[in-house]
C-alpha cells in the first residue's frame, strides 16, 4: 500500500513539475514584429541588434544553434562574428580586386618588376610588423597609461598583450583587434563604472561625483530597455551608491515623491501636476485634497532623518500647515519634468527605434534628477544636507555625451569625449593618452590601406628627429636632405682627377645616434639628390629608365645634431660608381674614359628625416 501511495505521489509531483516548467503563452505575433524590427534596425528597441534578436528567440527555447533546425528561421539571423565569447557587429568588408590588362613586357623586365614589387611588399610588411611591435610595447609596458588603456579597452588590451608576447602578427589579428576594440567601445558606458578605480582614480576623493556617474549608468542601462520613467527612477534608487551619501538620499526621496504623485488610471498625465495640489492656506473644504495629500506625505517624510530640516523650525516640528505645505510643494514641482519624460514616449508612440531616440529619452530622465536636485539647492532651508555642488550635477550630462557617441558608433568621438569630459579625473599628471585614440581609430578602419596609414602615423611622430636628440642611443632607418660641398676624386685607368663639387644631397641609410643625442654615425646606401632636386623644382615627371645603380652611393659620415632643430651638420665620404667621363693627358695622348667611379669627401648641412626607429633608449632609462 505504501509503495502504491508513493508511486501516486511521485506521478503527481512529476505532473505538477511539468506544468510548472511549461513556458507561458507568448504574444507570438508581437514577438515576430520585434524580430523583424531587430533585422531591419541597428538598435532594435534600444538594444543591440543581435542581443535583442536572440533575447526574443530565448523566450521560445531557441538559441543560434537550435534555431538552425527551424525551417522558417534558418538563414535569416543577423550577420555577426564572435569576439571573446560575445557577439559583435562586423561591417568590415573585403574589397574585390579588379584585374586589369597590361601590355606585354620582356622576360627580364618582368623578373625585375616582379622582384621589385615582391621586395617592396615584403619591406612594407616587415616595417608594418616592426611598427605594430613598437606600438604594442608602448601600449602594454607603461604602467600608468596601461592601467587607463586596460580600463577603457579590457578585452582589446588582453588581446594586445597576448599578441605582443607572441611577437608574430597576421592581417587576421589586426582585423580581430579592430572587432574587439569595437566591442569594448560599445561597452564603454559599462566599463566606465566597472573599472572606475583604474580609469577615474581621482574620483575616489569625490564620492558625490562618483555616485552621480552610477546614477547616470543606471538610467542608461534601464532606459535602453525601454522601461517607463517611474520604473527607471525606482531602479536608480536601488543602484550601487554610497550608503547614507547625499546622492543615495536624493534619489530615494525622488522615488518617494514619484510614487506619491502617481495619477489615477486612465488619466492623460502619469503624475498629478503640482498645481493641482496647492499649498494649504486655510482650513476650508476647497483645500481638503491638499490637506489629505500633504498629511500623508508628511508622515513619510518624518521617517527620514535627512528631511528633518524641512519639517523643523525653531527647534521643533512646524505646526503651521501653510508653511509646511509650501515647503513640500517645492518638492513636488518635479511632477512637471516627470510628465515631460513620459510624454516623450507618448510622442514616439512607445517606439524608440534609433540611437538618437534612445539618447534623447535618457536625457529627459536625467533632466528629472538634475532638475529635482536644482529645486532642492534653491530651497532656503537651514542645515539641509541634500544640496549638491554644481560639478556633481554636471556629471550626468557628461556621461550621456559619452553614451551618445557610443550609441551612434562614432568610435573616434567616443575617446575624444571621454578625455574632454573626464580627462581631469584619469591621471595625476593629466598626460594625454595617445594609445586610447590609436585603438579607437583602429576600431574605425575600413581597409588594409587605412591600417597601414594608421600604423605609420603612430609609429613615428612628425618631428621624429627630436626622438634621437632626446635619446641615450638610437638606431634608425634615416634619410637626409640638404646642401653638400667638398672635394671629388675621379679614378682613371692611368691617373686620378680631383675637383670641387657642390649640390643637393638626399642620402638614405642607417643612422646610429649616441652621446646623448649629440652625434650620429651614418652609413649611406643610396642618394636621391637629383630626384629630390627635380621634385623641389615642381617636376612631376616619372622616369622609366632610372636604374638603381644611378643612385647607389655607399658611404659613411659623422654628424653633429643641433639640439633644438631638426638640422644636422658634418662630414661624409661616399663612393659613386660609373659616374663621370674624364679626360687627361698621359704625355703621349689625351685619353677620354667614361663611366669612371668617384669618391667624395664633403661637408654637409642637412635636415634630419628619420623614416623608422629600429631601437631607442631614452636618456632616463
Image (cartoon, rainbow, N blue to C red):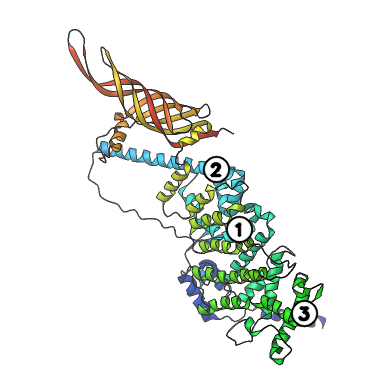
> Which quadrant of the figure has residue 112?
top left
| Farthest-out residue, top | 587
Tag 2 near tag 1, CB within 8 Å: no
> Which quadrant of the figure has residue 315?
bottom right
Q: Residue 145, how many percent across, how many down?
A: 59, 46
- Does the image show residue 10? no
> Which quadrant of the figure has residue 260?
bottom right
- Depicted 448 relative to depicted 281: above or below: above
- Measured Cα–Cα span from mark 3 to mark 2: 61 Å
- Secondary structure under tag 3 reads helix
Q: In this figure, which residue is indicated by the disc labeled 3?
A: 299
- Counting residues from the start of the chain, the first of labels 2 and 1 encountered is 2
| Image quarter hosting the N terminus | bottom right
- Depicted 9 relative to depicted 477: above or below: below
Q: Residue 255, how many percent across, how many down?
A: 68, 74
Q: In this figure, which residue is indicated by the disc labeled 2?
A: 138
- Measured Cα–Cα span from mark 1 to mark 3: 39 Å
Q: Is residue 107 left or right of residue 241?
A: left
Which of 181/273 is in front?
273
Q: Is residue 589 left or right of residue 491?
A: left
* Residue drawn at point x = 57 percent, y = 85 percent: 268
- Secondary structure under tag 1 reads helix
Camera-nearest label, 3 or 2: 3
Amino acid at each position: 500500500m505504501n509503495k502504491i501511495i508513493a508511486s501516486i505521489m511521485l506521478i503527481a509531483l512529476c505532473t505538477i513539475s511539468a506544468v510548472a516548467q511549461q513556458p507561458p503563452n507568448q504574444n507570438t505575433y508581437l514577438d515576430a514584429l520585434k524580430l523583424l524590427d531587430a533585422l531591419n534596425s541597428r538598435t532594435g528597441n534600444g538594444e543591440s541588434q543581435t542581443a535583442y534578436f536572440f533575447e526574443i528567440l530565448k523566450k521560445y527555447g531557441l538559441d543560434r544553434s537550435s534555431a538552425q533546425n527551424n525551417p522558417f528561421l534558418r538563414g535569416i539571423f543577423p550577420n555577426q562574428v564572435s569576439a571573446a565569447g560575445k557577439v559583435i557587429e562586423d561591417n568590415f568588408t573585403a574589397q574585390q580586386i579588379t584585374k586589369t590588362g597590361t601590355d606585354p613586357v620582356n622576360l627580364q623586365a618582368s623578373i625585375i618588376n616582379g622582384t621589385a614589387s615582391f621586395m617592396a611588399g615584403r619591406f612594407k610588411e616587415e616595417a608594418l610588423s616592426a611598427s605594430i611591435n613598437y606600438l604594442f610595447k608602448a601600449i602594454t609596458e607603461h604602467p600608468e597609461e596601461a592601467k587607463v588603456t586596460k580600463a577603457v579597452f579590457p578585452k582589446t588590451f588582453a588581446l594586445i598583450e597576448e599578441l605582443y608576447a607572441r611577437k608574430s602578427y597576421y592581417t587576421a589579428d589586426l582585423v580581430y583587434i579592430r572587432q574587439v576594440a569595437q566591442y569594448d567601445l560599445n561597452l564603454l558606458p559599462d566599463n566606465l563604472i566597472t573599472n572606475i578605480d583604474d580609469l577615474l582614480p581621482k574620483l575616489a576623493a569625490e564620492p558625490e561625483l562618483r555616485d552621480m556617474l552610477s546614477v547616470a549608468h543606471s538610467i542608461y542601462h534601464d532606459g535602453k530597455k525601454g522601461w517607463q520613467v517611474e520604473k527607471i527612477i525606482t531602479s536608480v534608487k536601488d543602484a550601487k551608491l554610497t550608503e547614507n551619501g547625499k546622492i543615495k538620499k536624493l534619489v530615494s526621496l525622488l522615488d518617494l515623491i514619484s510614487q506619491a504623485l502617481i495619477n489615477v488610471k486612465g488619466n492623460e498625465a502619469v503624475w498629478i501636476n503640482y498645481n493641482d495640489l496647492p499649498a494649504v492656506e486655510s482650513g476650508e473644504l476647497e483645500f481638503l485634497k491638499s490637506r489629505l495629500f500633504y498629511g500623508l506625505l508628511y508622515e513619510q517624510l518624518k521617517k527620514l532623518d535627512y528631511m528633518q530640516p524641512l519639517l523643523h523650525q525653531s527647534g521643533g516640528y512646524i505646526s503651521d500647515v501653510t508653511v509646511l505645505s509650501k515647503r513640500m510643494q517645492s518638492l513636488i514641482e518635479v511632477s512637471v519634468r516627470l510628465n515631460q519624460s513620459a510624454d516623450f514616449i507618448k510622442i514616439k508612440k512607445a517606439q524608440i527605434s534609433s540611437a538618437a531616440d534612445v539618447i534623447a529619452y535618457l536625457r529627459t530622465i536625467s533632466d528629472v534628477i538634475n532638475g529635482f536636485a536644482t529645486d532642492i539647492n534653491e530651497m532656503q532651508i537651514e542645515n539641509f544636507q541634500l544640496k549638491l555642488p554644481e560639478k556633481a550635477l554636471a556629471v550626468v550630462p557628461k556621461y550621456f555625451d559619452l553614451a551618445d557617441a557610443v550609441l551612434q558608433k562614432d568610435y573616434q568621438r567616443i575617446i575624444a569625449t571621454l578625455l574632454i569630459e573626464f580627462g581631469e579625473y584619469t591621471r595625476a599628471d593629466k598626460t594625454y593618452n595617445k594609445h586610447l585614440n590609436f585603438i579607437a581609430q583602429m576600431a574605425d578602419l575600413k581597409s588594409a590601406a587605412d591600417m597601414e596609414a594608421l600604423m605609420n602615423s603612430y609609429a613615428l611622430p612628425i618631428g621624429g628627429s627630436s626622438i634621437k636628440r632626446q635619446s641615450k642611443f638610437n638606431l634608425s632607418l634615416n634619410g637626409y636632405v640638404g646642401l653638400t660641398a667638398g672635394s671629388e676624386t675621379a679614378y682613371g685607368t692611368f691617373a686620378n682627377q680631383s675637383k670641387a663639387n657642390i649640390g643637393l644631397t638626399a642620402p638614405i641609410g642607417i643612422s646610429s645616434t649616441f652621446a646623448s643625442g649629440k652625434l650620429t654615425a651614418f652609413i649611406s646606401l643610396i642618394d636621391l639628390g637629383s630626384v629630390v632636386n627635380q621634385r623641389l623644382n615642381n617636376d612631376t615627371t616619372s622616369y622609366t629608365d632610372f636604374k638603381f645603380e644611378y643612385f647607389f652611393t655607399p658611404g659613411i659620415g659623422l654628424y653633429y645634431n643641433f639640439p633644438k632643430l631638426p638640422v644636422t651638420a658634418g662630414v661624409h665620404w661616399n663612393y659613386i660608381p660609373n659616374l663621370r667621363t674624364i679626360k687627361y693627358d698621359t704625355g703621349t695622348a689625351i685619353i677620354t674614359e667614361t663611366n669612371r667611379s668617384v669618391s667624395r669627401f664633403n661637408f654637409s648641412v642637412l635636415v634630419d628625416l628619420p623614416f623608422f626607429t629600429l631601437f631607442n633608449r631614452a636618456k632616463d632609462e
